[in-house]
Image (cartoon, rainbow, N blue to C red):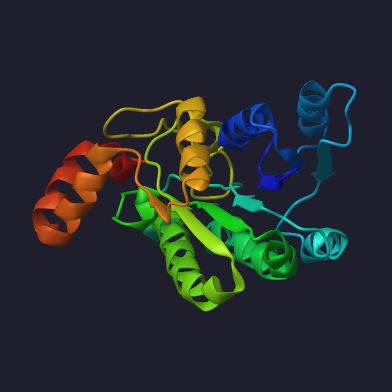
Amino acid sequence: MKTMLITGAASGLGWALALAARQQGWRLILVDRDARALADKCARLAGTDTDTVRQRALDLTDAAARDALVAELRDEPLRALVNNAGITHRSPAAATDMAVFQRVMAVDWEAPVALTLGLLPALRRGGGTVVNIGSMAGWMPVLGRAGYCSAKAALGQFFEVLRGEVADDGVGVLMVYPSFLATPIEANALGFDGRPAAHARSSVGRVRDADWMARLTLDALDTGKRRLFPDRFTWFASLLWRLAPDLYHRLMRRRFAVELES
């Protein structure tokens, strides 16, 4: 039976991925910092077959806890590692505490990089694939998301380099670039001072649900895709950014004006 590890698995896209993967017969290792929600979700998935779903409650930015997870799993064959856990902020860069940027980078870049490097032996044994949930915000600037855009851009660049370096080891990399999803990541967005953001998010295009994104992600994994751009509207917006950046900025400032006022 194939084994998949999913981070941020107790809610949102992580939970949707866990549901869809279990239906396809995957053995799951689910990781989340919310121990109570994680236990509830694992019980719902596993039923009486506890060997098929394991849970590990930890904060992936805690290096010691992360290293303990790696030490436990690195000798097991792992077919898929899904770096899904993430955090965002909604706040103008000049008004944002550095601690907010550091928190976003720790969750969205440092944790998936460290976990992947630690579990490379397990991925080599399993002929596995690293699935990274990036964002179109890593491809183009979005007002009020300077730290998030930076983290997702860094994530993409790191794993595109790693892809070439581990290809001969039989390890694959799938980069997933969703746009706006109806998940708790935005509901839990940080404000300029690290407390919850006070204003509603701005968005463009259609806000998709997590189940839709999960199905596309698992299909891309199954067919061996290297990159997934599920939303064509934001994909075209990223092309506009590259071809006509000044026009893109004017349109973005108009659409995301609330971010300038917050």
Where on the picture, by quarter, is residue 113? bottom right
Quadrant location of the N terminus in the rendered image: top right
Residue 21: x, y in percent? 64, 34
Task: Please give the name of the residue rendered at 58% of the width and 61% of the height, measured from the top-left corner.
Answer: 99
User: Is residue 98 or residue 226 the one in the foreground?
Assistant: 226
Apparent side of residue 187 relative to residue 202 in the rendered image (left or right): right
Task: Please give the name of the residue rendered at 80% of the width and 25% of the height, measured from the top-left corner.
Answer: 40
Apparent side of residue 175 relative to residue 206 in the rendered image (left or right): right
Q: Is residue 117 above or below residue 55?
A: below
Task: Please give the name of the residue rendered at 58% of the width and 57% of the height, measured from the top-left corner.
Answer: 130
User: Is residue 192 or residue 115 the one in the foreground?
Assistant: 115
Residue 80: x, y in percent? 64, 51
Q: Is residue 232 above or below residue 107?
A: above
Residue 117: x, y in percent? 67, 70
Residue 259: x, y in percent? 32, 42
Quadrant location of the C terminus in the rendered image: top left
- The answer to whether residue 127 is visible is yes
User: Is residue 256 or residue 108 the one in the foreground?
Assistant: 108
User: Is residue 36 or residue 232 the one in the foreground?
Assistant: 232
Apparent side of residue 209 relative to residue 113 in the rendered image (left or right): left
Q: Is residue 215 above or below residue 224?
A: above
- The answer to whether residue 191 is visible is no
